[in-house]
Amino acid sequence: MAKTTIEVDGEDVETGNTYDKYASKNPVERKLMDGFFTALDRSLPATDPARILEVGVGEGEVTARLAERWPDATFCGVDLPDPELAGHWDGKGFSPLFGDIGRLPFPDGSFDLVLAIEVLEHVPYPELALAELSRVARRDVVVSVPREPIWCAANLARGKYVKDLGNTPGHINHWGKKAFADLVGRRFDVRSVHSPFPWTMVAASVRSA
């Protein structure tokens, strides 16, 4: 499981490991991902979005899933420069941009729905990142992160990252369910909080001015 380090705003940021959990054939991991996607489906807005942004596209599985749900929507994706990760985007029908969550290249209120799935645990300044998501969002936001300390304990239970006490490479922020919901609530109106093991997923709405 390789990892890549790039410079963002003068700081080295690990893009994390390149293990593709979405394509895993392990039955336990498949069960976990089923729970994750069920929570995602429940977090999505009832009103169909016309323009959707995913920040931190990863392997592109989330955007591909949303494209099946809303085939008439316009999709845009952003992720850090990582050629190995970009290889996963081939054949998925969209071409994400390389960019930084702290300086998204879009005007204010550009998107009806903005997602940051498994992103904020990697970001040096998560509150500033949430402010940027709020700036480009017109209506709805869905964000998720690993749930601590469960995530690290689960890694240790399967013998992963033992020297780092179970912390996945690149994870520099750690939140429990309430702490993460409170963080999002400082910037948005929280609509729902889901706990698919071992994640926290928050659906929220942009506050009216």
Image: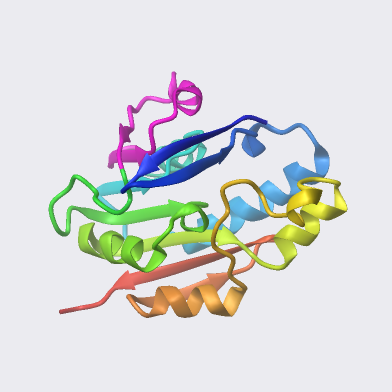
Q: Is residue 21 left or right of residue 158?
A: left
Q: Residue at x 64, y 65 (%)?
A: 147
* Residue bounds of the magenta highlight: 71-99
Q: Position of residue 205 (x, y in %)?
A: 33, 71
Colour scheme in use: rainbow
Q: Looking at the image, which is closer to me, 168 or 67?
A: 168
Residue 169 in picture, x, y percent from top left: 62, 46
Quick check: can you spot residue 204?
yes
Identify the image quadrant of the C terminus: bottom left
Residue shown at the point (39%, 62%) measured from the top left:
125
Which residue: 62% across, 54% down? 36
The quadrant holding residue 167 is: bottom right
Q: How many marks?
A: 0
Question: Where does residue 48 sit, x and y in percent of width and height?
Answer: 31, 55
| Residue placed most toward the observer, 120 or 45 | 120
Residue 136 relative to residue 83: left or right: left
Q: Which residue is pictured at 51% across the width and 33% down the height?
A: 59
Question: Which residue ends up furthest to the front in the rendered image?
Answer: 10
Residue 159, compared with residue 96, is above or below; it is below
Q: Quadrant of residue 190?
A: bottom left
Please tell me whether residue 198 is drawn above or below residue 66 in the rendered image.
below
Q: Is residue 180 magenta?
A: no
Answer left or right for 105 relative to 205. Answer: left
